[in-house]
């Protein structure tokens, strides 16, 4: 079975099972073909897609935790029944070391961020659209890892920024761009055209991670910085809500507690 999975060298070297999906390798029918992880469609097809993901990454599909994402900064700690977790609103999830729990976020242009503390094995996954960047969901995730028992330092954390809409395509109003820049760095504003601006969300997330104390070389861009891996541009590989609207599926970023 072919199952393309994008991974982070930094997370892999630290011993964390994880991955970012593409739209390839699943069983969902058109227009969502083929590896759609949207939670409100055919449950049998979703279970099969999740089973394939679990086999590829290396975790028990029965401990895959997700939440209802609302573009905020609330973080939940995975535990108990994943169905109960999915009924709760949150845009970040953490998993405790030794549990084998997997935490995941769904995206279709927003930025999936995977975080790990090699000193404990604790992990977190964050869903960072522009509202999440402004709400500081990345900061909430990092602070949770650093506040946990036995935590290492921020400079010891490892992070991966997954596929999302690129600066080539993420056009917003100048007021929204100003809010993103204020919450991150001027490097997030790619260019301005009249009363519009093009924003690099992955640059914004990287700036936030660095401001929190993470080392630049401990932050991976998967598959790459800049326009590489733009979900809106790469129709064959990625879903994009900006491109396809309600016909868009959902990608997944997932990480497993060590």
Image: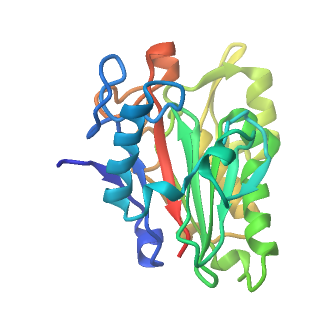
In the depicted view, which residue is nearer to us: 231 or 175? Answer: 231
- Farthest residue toward the left? 1
| Residue drawn 44% across the image and 26% down it | 249
Q: Is residue 167 above or below residue 210?
A: above
Image position, residue 110 (x, y; %): 58, 36
| Residue drawn 80% across the image and 23% down it | 175
89 displayed left or right of 80:
right
Image position, residue 81 (x, y; %): 63, 53
Residue 204 visible to an observer of this rendering = no
Residue 215 visible to an observer of this rendering = yes
43 displayed left or right of 34:
right
Q: Is residue 129 above or below residue 187?
A: above
In the depicted view, which residue is nearer to us: 164 or 101? Answer: 101
Q: Is residue 43 above or below residue 173?
A: below
| Residue drawn 36% across the image and 23% down it | 32
| Residue drawn 40% across the image and 68% down it | 9
Image position, residue 252 (x, y; %): 47, 44
Image position, residue 223 (x, y; %): 39, 50
Q: How many marks?
A: 0
């Amino acid at each position: 079975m072919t199952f393309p999975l994008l991974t982070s060298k930094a997370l892999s070297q630290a011993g964390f099972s994880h991955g970012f999906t593409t739209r390839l390798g699943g069983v969902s029918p058109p227009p969502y073909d083929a590896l759609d992880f949207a939670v409100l469609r055919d449950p049998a097809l979703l279970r099969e897609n999740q089973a394939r993901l679990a086999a590829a990454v290396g975790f028990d599909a029965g401990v895959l935790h997700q939440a209802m994402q609302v573009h905020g900064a609330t973080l939940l700690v995975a535990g108990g029944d994943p169905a109960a977790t999915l009924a709760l609103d949150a845009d970040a999830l953490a998993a405790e070391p030794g549990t084998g729990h997997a935490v995941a976020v769904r995206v279709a242009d927003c930025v999936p961020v995977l975080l790990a503390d090699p000193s404990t094995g604790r992990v977190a996954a964050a869903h960072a659209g522009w509202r999440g960047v402004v709400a500081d969901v990345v900061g909430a995730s990092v602070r949770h890892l650093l506040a946990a028992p036995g935590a290492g330092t921020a400079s010891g954390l490892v992070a991966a920024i997954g596929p999302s809409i690129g600066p080539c395509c993420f056009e917003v109003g100048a007021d929204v761009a100003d809010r993103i820049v204020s919450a991150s760095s001027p490097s997030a504003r790619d260019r301005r055209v009249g009363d519009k601006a093009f924003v690099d969300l992955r640059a914004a997330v990287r700036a936030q991670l660095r401001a929190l104390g993470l080392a630049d070389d401990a932050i991976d861009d998967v598959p790459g910085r800049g326009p590489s891996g733009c979900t809106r541009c790469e129709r064959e590989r990625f879903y994009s809500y900006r491109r396809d609207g309600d016909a868009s599926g959902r990608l997944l970023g997932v990480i497993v507690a060590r």
